Image (cartoon, coloured by chain):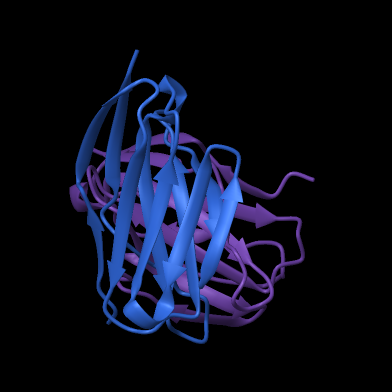
């Protein structure tokens, strides 16, 4: 049972480039989330999904897009990368509501 | 939105000492978790504890939902306990957690 798997683990982007952070879970969880963690801070919610085909904005959605075509996958798309998007990104999932969330290993992204 | 405050922000202990970490939140919650982020950045679930008391080895947690706080107790601390401890709460119907800024624990040998 792999849990929540994120790829890549590390990435360096140039300003203006685009990329997709991949997230997949094998626990059949309905709920999936993307968070970012800036140095010395807690995690902030970017986007979340309560099921396939349903996504919604979190606290800090600007500069990002998501899709949820399957229960297992929840990719996060960065368009026109900016230095302010340098952060560690975590994907998480949970099921059913009001149970614990499980987190992936994180993706460390640097935009230069 | 809901506010989450963790204290203290930093804590330095000698190995073997006990500690208490606190999480205050500004509204009623239906979900509360404690996480340990190790020096490699990995988030490890410690407790799912929206109310009541739980224990797991040297760690235990208590949430008093009516008074809007949770406590994480670490007994007989070890150097491997070092890292950042986060409290995350949810008062939505979509499982969206709000994290505190964490307590950075350093355990010295």
Does residue A18 appear in the picture of this structure? no
Does residue B105 appear in the picture of this structure? yes
Query: Is B92 positioned to the left or the right of B99 in the image?
Result: right
Q: Nearer the viewer, residue B26 or A109?
A: B26
Question: Measuring 45% from the left and 84% from the top, which residue is drawn there?
Answer: B92
Quadrant of residue A78 within the rendered picture: bottom left
Q: Nearer the viewer, residue B95 or A23?
A: B95
Letter of the blue chain: B
Q: Is residue A50 above or below residue B104?
A: below
| Residue B78 at x, y percent in the picture | 44, 23
Query: Is A44 positioned to the left or the right of B60 in the image?
Result: left
Question: Measuring 51% from the left and 87% from the top, which residue is drawn there?
Answer: B93
Quadrant of residue B83 within the rendered picture: top left
Picture mark count = 0
Quadrant in which the C terminus of chain B appears: top left
Letter of the purple chain: A
Q: Residue furthest right?
A: A1
| Residue A76 at x, y percent in the picture | 48, 60
Query: Is A26 positioned to the left or the right of B38 in the image?
Result: right
Quadrant in which the N terminus of chain B appears: bottom left
| Residue B107 at x, y percent in the picture | 33, 24
Question: Measuring 45% from the left and 43% from the top, which residue is drawn there?
Answer: B36
Query: Is A93 positioned to the left or the right of A18 in the image?
Result: right
Question: Measuring 20% from the left and 52% from the top, which residue is drawn there?
Answer: A84
| Residue A2 at x, y percent in the picture | 74, 44
């Amino acid at each position: 049972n792999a849990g929540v798997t994120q790829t890549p683990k590390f990435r360096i982007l140039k300003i203006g480039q685009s990329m997709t952070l991949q997230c997949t879970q094998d626990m059949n969880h309905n709920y999936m989330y993307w968070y970012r963690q800036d140095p010395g801070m807690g995690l902030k919610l970017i986007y979340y999904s309560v099921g396939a085909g349903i996504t919604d904005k979190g606290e800090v959605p600007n500069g990002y897009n998501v899709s949820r075509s399957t229960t297992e996958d929840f990719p996060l798309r960065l368009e026109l990368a900016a230095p302010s998007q340098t952060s560690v990104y975590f994907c998480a999932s949970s099921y059913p509501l009001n149970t614990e969330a499980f987190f992936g290993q994180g993706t460390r992204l640097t935009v230069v | 939105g809901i506010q989450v405050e963790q204290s203290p922000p930093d804590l330095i202990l000698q190995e073997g000492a006990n500690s208490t970490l606190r999480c205050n939140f500004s509204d009623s919650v239906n979900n509360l978790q404690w996480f340990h982020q190790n020096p490699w950045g990995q988030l490890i679930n410690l407790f799912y504890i929206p109310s009541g008391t739980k224990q797991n080895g040297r760690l235990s947690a208590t949430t008093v939902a009516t008074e809007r706080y949770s406590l994480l107790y670490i007994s007989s601390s070890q150097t491997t306990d070092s890292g950042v401890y986060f409290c995350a709460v949810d008062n939505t119907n979509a499982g969206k957690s709000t994290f505190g800024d964490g307590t950075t624990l350093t355990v010295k040998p």
